[in-house]
Image (spheres, grey):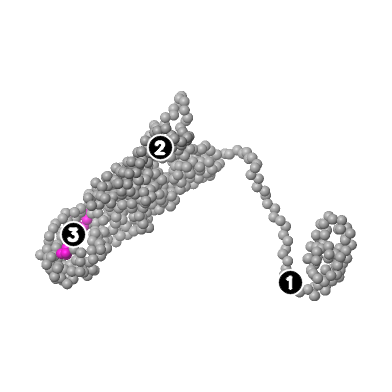
Amino acid sequence: MNCWAALHAPQQFIQTFRDRVVWTQCVRMIAEDDSPRKHEESFRMSEVASLLGEKREAFQVEEKPGPVPPKLEPAKRLKPIDRSQSFWGAIDIEKLIEEDHPARGIWAMVNQLDMTRLEQKIKAVEGRAGQSSLDPRLLMALWIYGYSEGISSARELSRMCEYEPGCQWLTGMQGVNYHTLADFRVDHKDELDGIFVEVLGLLSAEGCIEMKRIAQDGTKVKAQAGANSFRREERVRQHLQLAREQVEAMGSPESEEFSQRVIQARKRASREKKQRLEEALKELEQMQKARAESEKAQVRVSETDPEARVMKQPDGGFAPSYNVQICTDAANGIIVGVDVTQAGNDCDQLVNGVERVEANTGQTPEQVLVDGGYTMKNSNIEVMAERGIDLNGPVVENNSEASLKQRGIQPEFYPDKFRYDQTTDTFTCPADKALKLSRIHPCEGRIEYSYRASATDCRACPFQDRCCPKSSPRMVVRKEDSPAVKAFRAKMETEQAKQLYRTRAQIAEFPHAWIKEKLGLRRFRLRGRQKVRAEAVWACLTYNIQQWLRLVWRQSLQAAA
């Protein structure tokens, strides 16, 4: 029954609906109607209203509870969004960021540095035509601020200059081309080491570096190359020939019409590809010289980044990577040395790391904390002892249980089960057979004495399949450490040395975690060991300046407030 019909039969309406709310809605709809029928039926509205009032008590008695109708809410009133309007306003650049914003601290640090070496490369001079160059202090501050925000891309950093307050404050609301940023990061890699050392000098003057104790550790950072980019020599030579032909073809007239910019870009890409392949071939030849004759055919090199090496990752996988070596001062966690190597392990990096720290700071550390990757090589222990450096690290046994299992030797026939008789200088195996001295081999930090059993005894022994299944006769090696190694082993048995070693992870691994998590350096953006090393120095420089902001700059702001 519609609203107009309800007015013609009010009694029926009340009997049918018995709902004051529904009736009220009907009356409202009729009242809002502008048709002529509204005036003709107005008397019926009053009649129905009176009937409804008379039956109110009856409704309260006779009505059965039913569903409650939804309450009508007024429409929400929202501000409209008008993107077609123009907006004009004044911007106070100094008020873009707060007083303790990191960008201000980075600029304060960069202003203390000597930029003479960087300014020497600027070609724009007063009185001559040409565009002015950007201040190298600005470009350095932008890169440090970008790395601190986890940005290592020149394009992304250039975009940040258009909207990010910190970058806008540094640039004075001016745009910076990404080519300029990319070239600055690569072209000044030689001067970057001097800047890094200068920052260490400022930190040392502030008392942030003590050089009493340092920790060295390596971490793997993935290279800008895929695992499928590795090729053997034959395939590299094929690709190099194709690249040479492509470069030669670029010098001939174009068969298709392209813009000059596209043509130059294609030529540059072809030349760079040819250069990478030539470097890959040279790297491959060097690797083959270092390998045994039987392994030369298996040598492969990446065509994308020839200097990258496949290394084991912390998650157990393998990927093209570089080994980043970092030395950290224990006092305040300042990085005092950084280098990038192609070695998959750390055993040969300790001496170079300490020498690098001495060159950067002019001081020799009193103590060095390392993990087992460094102490597995006895020569490291001896060199540190000769230099008067207290080396702290775990004692590593070369005869590991894993290697014994790989040789098929059962636990009851491990070397510690063989008895040594000093008077006769012989070993006795668990089957009571003698092993006599067969060879004396001087090694780094020790002398190895090899004892061999009789081949006849081993062939007749019922335990041969458990003692020496893969090599017969059985051999046992007795190692006599040098005095320096013996002293190191005895020291590491003390509780004081063990407690000191427990602090190693906190000192050495924190910078690695910070650089990877906060600065985002999990994969290098550049290619080639020298450029990759420069990128690692940028990250460590940013880390040190962040520590300076925490230890010095913010403290001075609070003291001045």
Amino acid bearing label 2: Arg
Give x and y (percent) for residue 541: 40, 44
Circle 3 residue: 479
What is the crowding at mark 2: few (fewer than 14 residues within 10 Å), some, or many (at least 20)? Answer: some
Residue at disc 3, secondary structure: strand
Q: Is residue 338 left or right of residue 93?
A: left
Give x and y (percent) for residue 212: 32, 49
Residue 238: quadrant of the picture: top left
What is the crowding at mark 3: few (fewer than 14 residues within 10 Å), some, or many (at least 20)? Answer: some
Of badges 1 and 3, the one in the foreground is: 1
Quadrant of the image for the N terminus?
Answer: bottom right
Of badges 3 and 2, the one in the foreground is: 2
Q: Which residues are magenta?
A: 472-486
Q: Kindly give the residue lying farthest to the top in the view shown.
A: 127
Query: On residue 268, which mark appears?
Result: 2
Report if residue 202 lies within the magenta region: no
Residue 121 shows in the view = yes
Q: Residue at x 23, y 52 (%)?
A: 294
Residue 350 shows in the view = no
Amino acid bearing label 1: Gly
Q: Which badge, 3 or 2, is on the more N-terminal residue?
A: 2
Q: Residue at x 50, y 42 (%)?
A: 159
Q: CA distance from mark 1 to mark 3?
A: 96 Å
Query: On residue 66, which mark appears?
Result: 1
Q: Are marks 2 and 1 in contact (CB under 8 Å)?
A: no
What is the crowding at mark 1: few (fewer than 14 residues within 10 Å), some, or many (at least 20)? Answer: few
